[in-house]
Each structure stands twice: as C-alpha cells, then as structure tokens.
C-alpha cells in the first residue's frame, strides 16, 4: 500500500528526498521528513519558509520517486 511505502521512506536513515506525483499531474517534492504527516487516508506536506501546504489523498497518488531517479508506482509493485 502506498501509505506504508511513504511512511517507510520518511523513516529511512539517512533520509532520501523523494517526490510524489499526483493523478492531476502535480509533483510535490519532499525534502524534509519533519514537514510531512502521514494520515489515515492522505499525506500532508508543509513547505519550508512559506505558508504553502498540501493535503493529498492516497487515492490521488499515482507514484513516488526517489529524487535520485528510482520510481515506485502507487500500485504497490516495485520496479527493479
């Protein structure tokens, strides 16, 4: 499940920045794990030095990509 994969990425040491691609085509970069909250059905991301924030329902997460290029589709299947 994508929620568990995101939680796993947030807890990884050392933290690796990643991006979330939403079904509407928006991309959100996560560069600081302390600015993210994994909720029951969504992910909340706050952006540093601003009042910008976003709440993305997991239903609208199409993929998660480590910023070094590794890609994880939202279906839960991992590409190798």
Image (cartoon, rainbow, N blue to C red):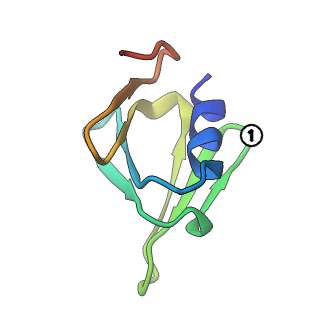
- Residue extending furthest toward the front: 14
Rendered position, 79 above or below 69: above
Rendered image quadrant of residue 69: top left
Q: Position of residue 57 (x, y in %)?
A: 55, 39
Q: Position of residue 40 (x, y in %)?
A: 74, 40
Residue in front for this viewpoint, 56 or 80: 80
Residue in front for this viewpoint, 80 or 55: 80
On the rendered structure, is 62 left or right of 41? left
- Residue extending furthest toward the bottom: 49
| Image quadrant where one finds the N terminus | top right
Rendered position, 54 above or below 42: below
Crowd tier of the residue under label 1, counting other residues whose Cα lies within 10 Å: few below 14, some 14–19, many 20 or above: few
Q: Position of residue 60 (x, y in %)?
A: 45, 33
> Who's the residue at 45% across and 53% down the image?
16
On the rendered structure, is 61 left or right of 67? right
Rendered image quadrant of residue 47: bottom left
Q: Which residue is mark 1?
A: 40
> Who's the residue at 44% across and 17% down the image?
78
Residue in front for this viewpoint, 18 or 46: 18
């Amino acid at each position: 499940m994508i929620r568990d994969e995101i939680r796993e990425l947030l807890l990884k040491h050392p933290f690796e920045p990643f991006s979330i691609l939403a079904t509407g085509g928006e991309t959100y970069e996560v560069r600081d794990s302390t600015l993210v909250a994994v909720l029951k059905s969504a992910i909340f991301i706050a952006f540093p030095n601003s009042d910008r924030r976003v709440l993305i329902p997991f239903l609208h997460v199409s993929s998660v990509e480590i910023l070094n290029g590794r890609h994880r589709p939202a279906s839960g299947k991992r590409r190798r």
